[in-house]
């Protein structure tokens, strides 16, 4: 029982790291972009990449490892509908993140390095920023939808 509670605690920490980072990153990135200050935007863009590595990826690892270990320890089949549905939502967010957001963030980062010292922000940056916002919202809503699925064991 003690190990299960430790794993459950780690799972909750993973949820907080993962969802907390993706939600907060969108907010402070939007606020940085509102300034239209190239230095602030370039700094924020760099932090998006760094916090994704530390908090988003760290949260993913904690969620995956602790969730799977909790299921095994609790004798819960990974094919249980609510686990499969929650994992599908989480996985769909991962696909959006890897297929769209990471490449867009990489391009945004390269552009930001070019204007970090105070240069002009190119129109391409703003076009890519809109793509990042749209798909970032999708990648945020998918794991948020997984939370009640996992808590209420619905699916």
Image (tube, rainbow, N blue to C red):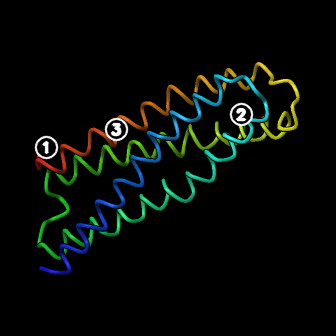
Q: Secondary structure at mark 1?
A: loop
**Vertical comparison of 114 with 20: above or below:** above
Q: Position of residue 126 (x, y in %)?
A: 69, 22
Going 57% across and 30% down the picture, which residue do you hit?
132
Q: Secondary structure at mark 3?
A: helix
* Closest to the observer, 14 or 98: 14
Quadrant hosting residue 8:
bottom left
Local crowd size for mark 3, using a 10 Å CA cut-off: few (<14), some (14–19), many (≥20) = some
Q: Position of residue 119 (x, y in %)?
A: 88, 28
Disc 2 vs disc 1: which is toward the camera? 2
Which is more N-terminal, label 1 or label 2? Answer: 2
> Is 46 displayed left or right of 134 in the figure?
right
Classify the position of the C terminus by image quarter.
top left
All told, the count of numbered labels is 3
Q: What label sits on residue 155 in the rendered view?
A: 1
Q: Secondary structure at mark 2?
A: helix
Question: CB under 8 Å between callouts 3 and 2?
Answer: no
Which is more N-terminal, label 1 or label 3? Answer: 3
Local crowd size for mark 2, using a 10 Å CA cut-off: few (<14), some (14–19), many (≥20) = many
């Amino acid at each position: 029982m003690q190990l299960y509670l430790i794993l459950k605690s780690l799972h909750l920490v993973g949820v907080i790291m993962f969802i907390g980072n993706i939600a907060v990153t969108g907010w402070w990135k939007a606020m940085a972009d509102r300034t239209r200050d190239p230095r602030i935007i370039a700094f924020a863009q760099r932090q998006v990449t760094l916090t994704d590595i530390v908090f988003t990826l760290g949260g993913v690892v904690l969620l995956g490892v602790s969730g799977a270990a909790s299921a095994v320890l609790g004798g819960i089949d990974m094919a249980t509908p609510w686990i499969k549905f929650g994992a599908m939502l989480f996985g769909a967010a991962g696909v959006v993140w890897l297929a769209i957001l990471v490449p867009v963030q990489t391009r945004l980062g390269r552009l930001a390095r070019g204007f970090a010292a105070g240069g002009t922000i190119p129109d391409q940056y703003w076009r890519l920023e809109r793509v990042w916002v749209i798909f970032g919202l999708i990648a945020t809503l998918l794991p948020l939808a997984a939370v009640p699925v996992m808590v209420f064991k619905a699916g």
